[in-house]
Image (cartoon, grey):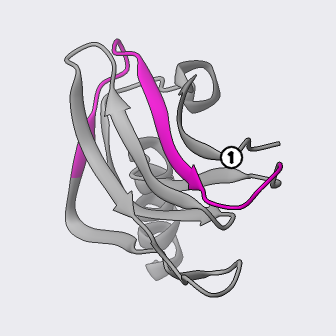
């Protein structure tokens, strides 16, 4: 539950990422509830913000206008030996509490899957 006013929440997500190797993020999509202002994906080891989803809220109703999506062929490098966190900034202008949810979906390059797919593809050509 989100109290009235501005808040900032930080969540360690290193364990959930379970990175076994250095890789790259190619797509990120956030699911957020109204009154979210920004959701940032941060390399806690270097203290570098890797990407921020700046949200637009309607003034007259409890719904988000826009939440951006990240997509890149180049990708954002992430390292297996680093720690990562999400930082959620909110502003609840209403009286009382409001529900809040923040999810981040990451789509990462997987070299083992690439090797498997290439091996399968080439073996099927013979």
The number of numbered discs placed on residues in the rendered structure image is: 1
Q: Which residue is drawn at 23% across and 49% down?
A: 76
Position of residue 103 in the picture relative to residue 88 (left or right): right
Closest to the observer, 123 or 61 = 61
Magenta stretch: give its range.
76-96
In the displayed structure, 102 sits above or below 31; it is: above
In the displayed structure, 15 sits above or below 76; it is: above
Position of residue 94 in the picture relative to residue 118 (left or right): right
Locate residue 33, reporting x and y percent.
Answer: 69, 64
Closest to the observer, 34 or 118 = 34
Locate residue 52, reporting x and y percent.
Answer: 32, 53
Q: What element carries label 1?
A: loop
Give the quadrant of residue 58: bottom right
| Label 1 Cα crowd, 10 Å radius (few <14 / some 14-19 / many 20+) | some
Q: Which residue is drawn at 64% across and 28% down?
A: 16
Report the residue marked by disc 1. Answer: 4
Residue at the far front in the pictured view: 95
Q: Residue at x 44, y 47 (%)?
A: 110
Locate residue 74, reporting x and y percent.
Answer: 16, 62
* Image quadrant where one finds the N terminus: top right
In the displayed structure, 82 sits above or below 78; it is: above
Position of residue 28 in the picture relative to residue 101 (left or right): left
Q: Which residue is drawn at 47% across and 23% down?
A: 20
In the displayed structure, 95 sits above or below 82; it is: below
Locate residue 59, reporting x and y percent.
Answer: 54, 82
On whether residue 94 falls in the magenta region, the answer is yes
Closest to the observer, 106 or 10 = 10
């Amino acid at each position: 539950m989100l109290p009235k006013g501005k808040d900032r929440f930080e969540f360690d997500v290193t364990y959930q990422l379970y990175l076994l190797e250095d890789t790259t993020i190619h797509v990120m999509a956030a699911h957020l509830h109204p009154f979210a202002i920004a959701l940032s994906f941060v390399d806690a080891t270097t203290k570098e913000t890797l990407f921020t989803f700046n949200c637009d809220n309607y003034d007259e109703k409890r719904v988000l206008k826009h939440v951006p999506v990240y997509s890149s062929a180049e990708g954002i490098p992430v390292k297996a030996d680093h720690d990562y966190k999400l930082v959620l900034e909110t502003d609840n202008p209403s009286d009382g509490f409001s529900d809040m949810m923040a999810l981040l979906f990451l789509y990462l390059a997987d070299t083992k899957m690439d090797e498997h797919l290439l091996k399968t593809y080439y073996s099927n050509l013979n």
